[in-house]
Image (cartoon, helix red, strand yellow):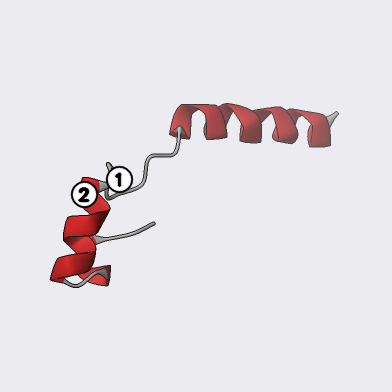
Amino acid sequence: MIRREHLDRKGALLFRLLGCRYGDHRDWAAIDAWADDIARELVA
């Protein structure tokens, strides 16, 4: 994950010009469902 404070001014400008976004964009619902599937398999 890249945060704004990781980049200097020029790096931040280039990052935005390239269309990148800051933050965590993982699909948490899908991750939770995947973990639930694993837990069910381990119990079985």
Q: Is residue 36 above or below residue 23?
A: above
The x and y percentages for residue 16 are 21, 49
User: Where does the image place residue 6, in percent across and percent down from the top left?
Assistant: 27, 70
* Image-quadrant location for residue 20: top left
Q: Tell me, yes or no, whether the two marked residues, 1 and 2, touch with CB atoms within 8 Å.
A: yes
Q: Return the residue at label 1.
A: 20
SS of the residue at dot 1?
Answer: loop
Going by the image, does 31 lie left or right of 20?
Answer: right
**Residue 24 falls left or right of residue 13:** right
Q: Which of 28 and 25 is in front in this view?
A: 25
Residue 16 shows which numbered tag? 2
Inspect the image, locate mark 2, and give the three-letter code of the amino acid beneath it: Arg
Quarter location, residue 34: top right
Between 22 and 32, the residue placed more toward the observer is: 22
Residue at point 19% right, 73% down? Answer: 8
Q: How far apart are marks 1 and 2 (CA)?
A: 5 Å
Q: Residue at x 47, y 27 (%)?
A: 29
Label 2: few (<14), some (14–19) or many (≥20) C-alpha neighbours in 10 Å: few
The kind of residue on which mark 1 rests is Cys
- Residue 3 at x, y percent in the picture: 27, 60
Furthest residue in direction right, as rendered: 44
Q: Is residue 29 left or right of residue 34?
A: left
Q: Nearer the viewer, residue 27 or 11?
A: 11
